[in-house]
Image (spheres, rainbow, N blue to C red):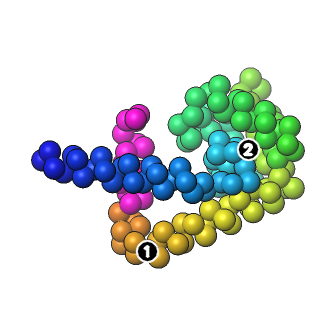
Amino acid sequence: MEEQFLALIQAWVQLSGMLKNSRFTKELPYNEAIVMLQLYQSRDSALSIKEITASTHMLKSQVNRTINSLEEKGLLERCEGEGDRRVGYVRPIKEGLSVFLQVHASSMEIAKNISSIIGPEDTDHFIRIVNKLAQSGYHL
């Protein structure tokens, strides 16, 4: 069992090194790209700060700083949601979405390359394992 744990640590170190040396998001800082991805996936719907915080596993203060930065860059705008006016919502600006889509295209290319190396079955296994870790609430 200890050998398996050592192999897991070694695999984690290798993966961490690969991710550190090959950023998925070169044109936008990581947190900005992640928030824009959430908005892109919402398909023209505004998202609340709370929804973004929950889906990204970022701290609320990080989400607020990121949203402020994206708003200053003209990539998103704050808006009112239906119902409670105290709840803050944001939505992408069309021009801002085109900036994100350039970042997204390069990320998709990296994902395609990884999937072609490990194959579709291992890609599905990798996604399942990462989602399981994320849903467990475990923080490294």
**x then y, percent, for residue 90:** 76, 39
Q: On the rendered structure, is 64 left or right of 58?
A: right
Residue 35 position within the rendered picture, expressed as x and y whole percent measured from the top left: 67, 44
Mark sitting on residue 117: 1
**Quarter residue 65 falls in:** top right
Q: Nearer the viewer, mark 2 or mark 1?
A: 1
Residue at 45% in and 49% down = 16
Tell me how far mark 2 sits from mark 1, CA to CA: 36 Å
| Of the pair 124 and 90, the residue shown nearer to us | 124
The residue located at (48%, 56%) in the rendering is: 18
Magenta residue span: 126-140
Give amino acid for label 2: Ala
Percent from the top left, x then y, of residue 58?
57, 34
What's under tag 1, amino acid-wise? Answer: Ile
Magenta stretch: includes residue 131: yes
Residue at image location 40% in from the left, 72% down from the top: 118
Q: Position of residue 127 (x, y in %)?
A: 42, 59
Query: Residue at the location (12% across, 47% down)?
Result: 1
Residue 83 visible, this angle: no
Element class at badge 1: helix
